[in-house]
Amino acid sequence: MDTEEILASAYTLLNGAVLNYKGEPVGTAAALDDGVVAPNYEECFVRDFVPSALVFLCDGQYDIVRNFLRMVVQLRHQQSVMEGHERALGLMPASFRVPAKDDVNGVPTADFGDLAIGRVAPVDSAMWWIILLRCYVLTTGDIKLAHSPEFQESMRATLDLYLKESFETSPAMLVPDASFMIDRRMGVYGHPLEIQALLYGMLSTAQELLLPLPENERLLSNSKKRLQTLRSYVRIYYWLDSQRLNEIHRFGSEEFGQDVSNHLNIYPETIPDWMDGWLPPNSGYLVGNLGVGRMDFRVFSFGNLLSILFGLTTDEQADQIMNLYTARWPELVGNMPLKISYPAVDGDKWRYTTGSDPKNVPWSYHNGGSWPCLLWAFVGAAVRTGRHDLARKALDQAMEPLCCDQWPEYYDGKAGSLIGRRANVHQTWSAAAVILAHKFLEDPDALAVFESINF
């Protein structure tokens, strides 16, 4: 198949997934699989819609993105009250469902994690909403939408919630397991990298979109301080290369005071066996999770790629992350880009980490599975670091198999060569990721829709 045929197939899926409410497009369904396993895949997921939204913005279809942004704001007020506990309005839904065409009196309904497998409120939804709002404003020039009272109040509520004091001293954000793209138990409770990257992007975006009014002064000041400390913290403590690994290997522990070398009390015994000799020279990555006495050495692709796109990494770190993908292509990319996490956990560790989750068996789904939807972030990060060769290689090897396999949600196996055992086909963000990645490579101006978030 040639490129035009593949892109035409992807656009057919994307356009066919558009959801309408009162005659207006408001988002895209997660999948168009007639045999869909999860009924909520008929809904529009806030996180999943982002690559679709960026395609629409690139193509000048602004209405659907504007309507989506408005819809999510309106749905904030649908949060359920459980046992007298009402959650803050700063949270935004994980997904929403629009009524059927023949249901003239129906209204959209939202899920705030109450119905999801993990039963966890989606911490990342509000972050993605604010970041997408900036992409919309950059592309359309419609700053009035961001400055409208409803949108200002929404951003203010979100920042107020996410900047609240906690009992921790870390500038990183503490969240439960399953609160972001990895939405089932995977042992990433604490301070997962993806949340820190999104937090940094959201705080930086707020500096531009939140009006400098007296009622916003405290939030703007606090968010600026937080993003500066978060950036330094992630660049120093999350970073892992051969030199840093050797330092951790020789760390003393149980140290006390300000000027200690092992500031977070990471025990050298926690370094997994697979790390010995795995990091090539002049390469490195941001570890998946970090806390006092705890470092998760797994490579989580999305968090690393978003850190590059948002400018959370230094330029040198961004280059070294791409060097790692170059040197460890079979493990991190394989036949079908891109490993969501590496390596997979198995055996007893799989049992107590995932709760014996039958969907997260080793080298499947979130436990080392391969996700085509990550292509857009990989290609964007590669282009941003000048690695067009890697961007082209990843896209070229994925496009035709994805189209022939009917756009699966994810792939299984160490090499990512098996269609996911429980994967839906006709997955919207798999198709949107290919379109967006192709735009990033072929149109020099396309990456500005996302890359312009250069804080």
Image (spheres, grey):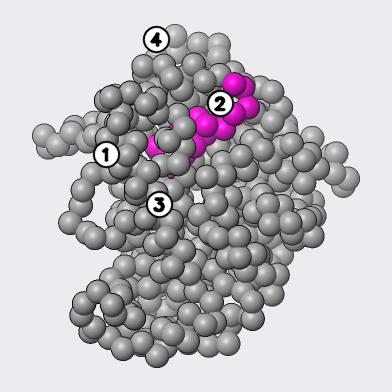
Of labels 3 and 2, earlier in sequence is 2
Residue identified by numbered label 1? 161
Indicate which disc, 2 or 4, sits on the residue closer to the N terminus. Answer: 4
Earlier residue among tags 4 and 1 = 4
Identify the magenta region. Answer: 123-141
Query: Is residue 138 rendered to the left or right of residue 146?
Result: right
Which amino acid is tagged 3?
Answer: Gln
Q: CA distance from mark 3 to mark 1?
A: 19 Å
Q: Is residue 175 visible?
A: yes
- Residue 20 percent across, percent down from the top left: 54, 19
Q: Main secondary structure of the magenta part?
A: helix
Which numbered mark, 4 or 1, is in the foreground of this view?
1
- Answer with the quarter of the image where residue 138 lies: top right
Q: Residues within 10 Å of mark 2 (few under 14, many from 20)?
A: some
To which residue does mark 3 refer? Answer: 228
Question: Residue beneath label 2, please?
Answer: 137
